[in-house]
Image (tube, rainbow, N blue to C red):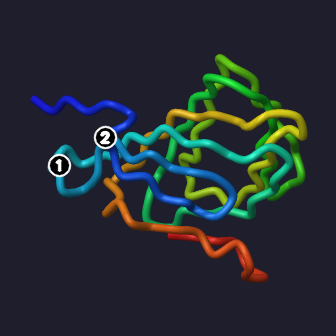
Amino acid sequence: MIIRTLDSVHCVDWGNGLSRRFLTESDGLGYTVTDTIVRAGTKSRLEYRRHLEACYCISGSGEVVDMAGTSHPIIPGTLYALDQHDAHWLIAGPHEDLRLVCMFTPALRGDERHNLDSSEFSQY
C-alpha cells in the first residue's frame, strides 16, 4: 500500500505552474497521478508524445484548445483526456490558478519539465 500526502510528494515547477507528483514510474503501478497547478493567466503549448493524459478540474477555470482551434471550457467537474497524444493549448483563466488532478500512462519518471520557450509544442 502506498500512502502519500500533498506536503510529502515531489513538486516540480513544470514551466507555468507546479506539478505535485503523487505516483511515478518508481512506484511500479504503470501510471502517474499528479495534483497540478496552472498559474492564472498562463498559456501553455503542450504535447505528450510518449504518454496519454487525463485531467480532472477541481478548482479554477480555463480552457483547452485543440489543433483545429476549438476551445473547450474547463471548470470544476470537467475532465479532458488527450487520448491521441493531442497537441493542445492549456490556458488558465486570468483571475485564479487552475487546479487539475492528472493521470499519465505510461508513468512519468517524475522529473520531467516543459520547455515553454520553444517555438514547437513542449513535449515529454
Residue 70 on image: x %, y %: 87, 45
Type of the residue with mark 1: Asp
Q: Residue furthest top?
A: 77
Front residue of 8/39: it is 8
- Residue at horizontal 50%, vertical 47%? 53
Residue wearing tag 2: 8
Residue 114 on image: x %, y %: 59, 69
Label 1: which secondary element: helix
Dot 1: few (<14), some (14–19), or many (≥20) neighbours within 10 Å?
few
- Residue at horizontal 35%, vertical 58%? 108
- Residue at horizontal 47%, vertical 58%? 12
Residue wearing tag 1: 27
Which image quarter: residue 7? top left
Front residue of 15/33: it is 15
Residue 10 on image: x %, y %: 36, 52
- Judge whether 60 appears above or below 33 on screen: above
Q: Is residue 13 left or right of residue 39?
A: left
- Judge whether 82 appears above or below 6 on screen: below
Q: Is residue 29 left or right of residue 107?
A: left
Residue 65 on image: x %, y %: 81, 48
- Residue at horizontal 55%, vertical 42%? 36
Q: Earlier in the sequence, mark 2 or mark 1?
A: 2
Q: Nearer the viewer, mark 2 or mark 1?
A: 2
On the rendered image, what quadrant is the N terminus found in?
top left
Which image quarter: residue 8? top left
Q: Is residue 10 left or right of residue 113?
A: left
Front residue of 70/107: it is 107
Type of the residue with mark 2: Ser
Q: Residue furthest front?
A: 7
